[in-house]
Amino acid sequence: MILTVDAAIIVGGRSLLLLRRSKYPFAGKLVFPGGHAEDKDGNTRTAASRELFEETGIEIPPERWGLLTVLDGRGRDPRYGFSVSVVYRADIDDPLILGKIRPSDEASEILLVPIDELREEDLGFDHFDAIKKIKK
């Protein structure tokens, strides 16, 4: 089993911070910042903070994360069999956060996208399932 974390950053209550993947799988698709939980993390909230910082340069302390959803099952990621992703959310009011971003090599760009404009075909993995929870 593979355990990953994803960070849904909601800016101004209306937009999501998303990465455009530059690598397989889902190259060119929009995804949440995220990745594998590691033994050094201690818990999944710490893993979400680490992954967000590694992929964007944005620092959010673990205690600020709220649980959005858990995505699990076979076939979610073509590299693995069964995988589980814990998706956390953090709400940020400051759109100037984009000025602090430094993308990693896993993303060709980092975007702030209005939630209402996102379509399932734009997203990689099963991240649109988590976005539907935000839209409720």
Image: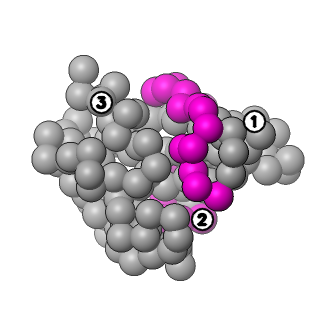
> What is the C-alpha distance between the residues marked 3 and 1?
25 Å
Q: Which residue is mark 1?
A: 43
> Is residue 55 within the magenta segment?
yes
Q: Which residue is mark 3?
A: 132
> What is the C-alpha distance between the residues marked 2 and 1?
17 Å
N-terminal of the two: label 3 or label 1? 1
Vertical relation: 118 (above or below) 99: above
SS of the residue under disc 1: loop
- Range of residues picked out in magenta: 54-79
Vertical relation: 113 (above or below) 55: above
Residue at 69% over, 45% down: 81
Residue reaching furthest top? 136
**Label 1 amino acid?**
Asn
Q: Which residue is mark 2?
A: 54
**How packed is label 3: few (under 14 Cα within 10 Å), some, or many (20 or more)?**
few
N-terminal of the two: label 2 or label 3? 2
